[in-house]
């Protein structure tokens, strides 16, 4: 399949897994795997921009990740801050906008401040929107939405009869994003791991054995080629089977 015949997804979401295994295979500390993983982030963001993908959502830190050893959590937060600071000029050159979803108030203050600064610096851009999921959990997102909806019902600004799928979607962290077309998970695990539970109802899922630090533009193109061959039916029958 040539690049011209690829169907480019509007929104790609990625569970970036396998940094630890990549490091272990090389006898390196886990943080070296995360560092190499940050290089993959750089490469994949650039490639998505070049291909005309509109939204890229990366599962950078889950709520469950807080349970990792403190040293690893701290190292990941520092890496995130470093990335957010260092990448601004390149992201800006490539017309990338930045967003973040999750319980962002749980992040260390320095990371929160850097995140706000980077988002503001890239706010006028009109190309790819890079969405970082940080301290993110799909169930927590639904809990937060339900609380907000309940509060509105209680104060009378929302009628129970008006609670429908659109209303729920409007209360999620992703309220201004389309649902992902393609969800990629690296390193072979067949799990959704509490990522975008509501939003992936009709998303095509692609799992590769490749570990995240080895996932770069060629691997992204393979994923998009596989996606391009899928027939998305959204619960309907295939057009060729209609009779
Ligand atoms: C999973 O690998 C990866 C993470 C928990 C964190 C993802 C972070 C990065 C890619 C680097 C920094 C991010 C940005 C946005 C600059 P794992 O540690 O679970 O791997 P394992 O399952 O092999 O142990």
Image (spheres, grey):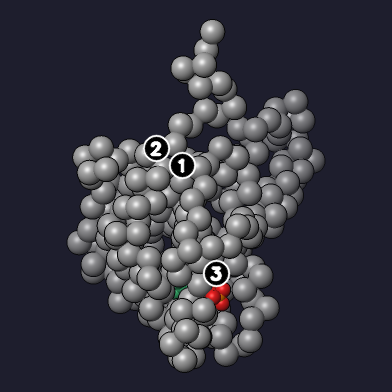
Q: Position of residue 228 (x, y in %)?
A: 37, 39
Q: Nearer the viewer, residue 125 or 205?
A: 205
Quarter assignment of residue 237: top right
Cβ–Cβ below 8 Å for labels 2 and 3? no
Q: Is residue 113 visible?
A: no
Q: Which residue appears at 38% of the width and 66% of the height?
A: 215
Real-space CA distance between mark 2 and mark 1, rounded to the nearest whole angstrom: 13 Å
Q: Is residue 161 visible?
A: yes
Among all residues in the image, which is located at the extreme top? Answer: 243
Q: Position of residue 196 (x, y in %)?
A: 59, 51
- Give the position of the N terminus as an image quadrant: top left
Q: Position of residue 68 (x, y in %)?
A: 64, 81
Q: Residues within 10 Å of mark 2 (few under 14, many from 20)?
A: few
Q: Which residue appears at 73% of the width and 46% of the height?
A: 146
Name above or below for residue 205 compared with residue 164: below
**Helix, strand or loop under label 2:** loop
Name above or below for residue 112 compared with residue 218: below
Identify the residue under disc 2. 229
Identify the residue under disc 1. 181
Identify the residue under disc 3. 61
């Amino acid at each position: 399949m040539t690049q011209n015949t690829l169907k480019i997804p509007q929104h790609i979401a990625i569970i970036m897994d396998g940094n630890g295994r990549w490091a272990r295979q090389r006898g390196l500390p886990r943080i070296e795997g995360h560092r190499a993983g940050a290089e993959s982030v750089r490469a994949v963001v650039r490639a998505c921009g070049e291909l005309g993908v509109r939204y890229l959502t990366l599962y950078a830190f889950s709520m469950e990740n807080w349970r990792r050893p403190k040293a690893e959590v701290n190292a990941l937060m520092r890496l995130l801050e470093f990335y957010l600071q260092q990448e601004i000029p390149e992201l800006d050159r490539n017309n990338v906008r930045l967003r973040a979803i999750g319980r962002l108030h749980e992040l260390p203050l320095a990371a929160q401040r850097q995140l706000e600064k980077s988002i503001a610096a890239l706010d006028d851009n009109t190309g790819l929107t890079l969405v970082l999921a940080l301290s993110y959990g799909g169930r927590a997102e639904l809990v937060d939405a339900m609380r907000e909806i309940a509060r509105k019902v209680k104060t009378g600004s929302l009628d129970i009869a008006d609670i429908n799928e659109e209303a729920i979607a409007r209360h999620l962290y992703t309220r201004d994003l389309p649902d992902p077309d393609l969800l990629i998970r690296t390193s072979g695990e067949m799990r959704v791991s509490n990522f975008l539970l509501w939003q992936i109802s009709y998303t095509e899922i692609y799992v590769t054995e490749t570990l995240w630090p080895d996932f770069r533009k060629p691997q992204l193109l393979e994923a998009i080629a596989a996606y391009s061959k899928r027939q998305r039916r959204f619960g309907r029958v295939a057009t060729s089977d209609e009779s």
